[in-house]
Image: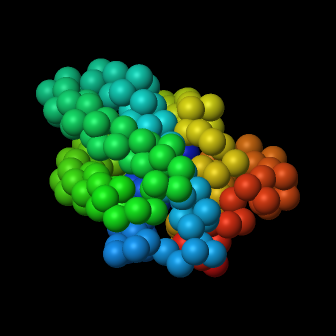
Amino acid sequence: MPVSAPNPGADVVRIHKVITRGLAISIEYGQGDGPEQAQRDGYQRYVKALSGLVHGHHQGEDLIAFPFWNSKLPEGPFERLASEHRDMLPLLARIDAWLASGEAAWKGPALVGLQSALGALDQLWHPHISVEEATLGPENSAHLLSAEENTQLAAELAAHGQAHSQPAELVMAFIFYNLTSEDREAMMAVLPPVVSQELVPVVWRPAWEPMRPFLLP
């Protein structure tokens, strides 16, 4: 299927790539005493964007993607996937608590707690997305959905993600710059041009620029 043709399954895979890299980078730079002093603000913004994206992505799947796909694949593992989303919530809550802990975030016990939460989330994440992509990934989107259904589902998920993956000024840049150039271009095509041409590069840049050391070029 051409890159320009709407395929919500391909969009799901790209978001999964963003979160997978986001987890890996958060774990890498959070080791020991954490990132160097000059990068701490950017690291916290990066982790905040990761948490906000996971929350918004899972909510969109629970409310939109899973009910839609259940009508196509009634024997699909949607209750299992939704249950795994719920299993991740306490770990996200621990990450959010670390983000809200101020200067104490950089003390040993807090960083150990963050690493524990990130590591546990990473352990749940990989088997979860393997099942998810096999169920509602690009192949099933291409073969089981009509062009109209692909377009509708892709638009609904994109709109929900924009509205609920917060803070948008961090999350949108986090999405774009945790993707390689080809995937980034495809993801930008799903969103209104104002996001990629004005909001991220100009209006929101001061907010996300501190994350730059952790992002792809």
Q: Nearer the viewer, residue 151 or 65?
A: 65
Q: Residue 122 occupies which quadrant of the picture?
A: bottom left
Q: Which residue corresponds to the image point at 61% horizontal and 63% vertical from the top-left?
A: 41
x, y percent for residue 79: 19, 27
Q: Residue 44 occupies which quadrant of the picture?
A: bottom right
x, y percent for residue 2: 54, 59
The colour style of the image is rainbow
36 left or right of 59 in image: right
Q: Relative to 166, is 207 above or below?
A: below
Q: Is residue 159 visible?
A: no
Q: Nearer the viewer, residue 46 or 190?
A: 46
Q: Which residue corresponds to the image point at 78% horizontal and 59% vertical from the top-left?
A: 205
14 left or right of 207 in image: left
Q: Nearer the viewer, residue 148 or 172?
A: 172
The quadrant the C terminus occupies is: bottom right
x, y percent for residue 8: 47, 43
Q: Relative to 50, is 76 above or below?
A: above
Q: Which residue corresponds to the image point at 49% horizontal and 74% vertical from the top-left?
A: 35
Q: Which residue corresponds to the image point at 67% horizontal and 66% vertical from the top-left?
A: 210
